[in-house]
């Protein structure tokens, strides 16, 4: 003899007696461990160079952000890495690009 016509569905609190806050703290503990690991990493020892975004590059060069995008469309911007939907520039690539566009080299904007 059945007492219920439909199976009983337990809510989240009934399935997990520690409640949502218990899961939150467990996740927080795991993330804190990962964050501590990442903060302790020395990217210079790994041979990695810091990357800067478009806004940081524009601020560093003293130009509007749109100028960086315009330079990219015309092929005149420093070499960039596309990470997901974000553009990142390696400092060494920006330095090489600056040297190539230095007035003392005889080249200005790619012209002799």
Image (cartoon, helix red, strand yellow):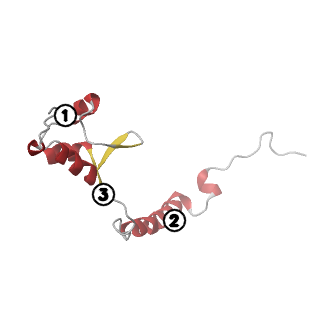
Q: Residue furthest right?
A: 1
Residue 36 falls left or right of residue 4: left
| Residue 29 drawn at (x, y percent) | 47, 67
Position of 8 compared to 91: left or right?
right
Quick one: quadrant of the C terminus?
top left
> Mark 2 and 3 residues: CB-CB less than 8 Å, in contact?
no
Q: Mark 1 points at which residue?
A: 110
Residue 20: assigned label: none
- The Cα–Cα distance between marks 1 and 2, rounded to whole angstroms, is 56 Å
Residue at the disc numbered 2: 26
Q: Residue 50 carries which label?
A: 3
Point out the frontmost of discs 1 and 2.
1
Which residue is at 28% across, 29% downward? 73
Q: Could you say which is closer to the camera, residue 45 or residue 75? A: 75
- Ranked by sequence position, the earlier of labels 1 and 2 is 2
Mark 1 element type: loop
**Residue closer to the observer: 54 or 15:** 54
Of the two numbered discs 2 and 3 in the rendering, the one whose residue sits closer to the viewer: 3
- In x, y percent, where is residue 68? 22, 36
Residue at 32% of width from left, 46% of height from top? 88
Of tags 3 and 1, the one toward the viewer is: 1
Task: Report x, y in % for residue 85.
Answer: 39, 39
Q: Within 10 angstroms of label 3, few (less than 14), some, or many (20 or more) residues?
A: few
Few, some or many residues within 10 Å of mark 2 (<14, 14–19, 20+) = few
Q: Residue, x 37% and y 64% (percent of image)? A: 47
């Amino acid at each position: 003899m059945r007492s219920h016509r439909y199976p009983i569905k337990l809510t989240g609190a009934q399935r997990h007696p520690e409640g949502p806050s218990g899961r939150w703290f467990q996740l927080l503990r795991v993330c804190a461990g990962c964050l501590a690991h990442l903060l302790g990493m020395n990217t210079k020892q790994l041979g990695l160079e810091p990357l800067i975004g478009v806004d940081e590059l524009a601020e560093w060069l003293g130009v509007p952000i749109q100028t960086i995008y315009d330079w990219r469309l015309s092929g005149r911007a420093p070499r960039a890495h596309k990470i997901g939907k974000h553009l990142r520039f390696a400092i060494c690539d920006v330095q090489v690009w600056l040297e190539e566009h230095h007035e003392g080299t005889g080249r200005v904007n790619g012209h002799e």
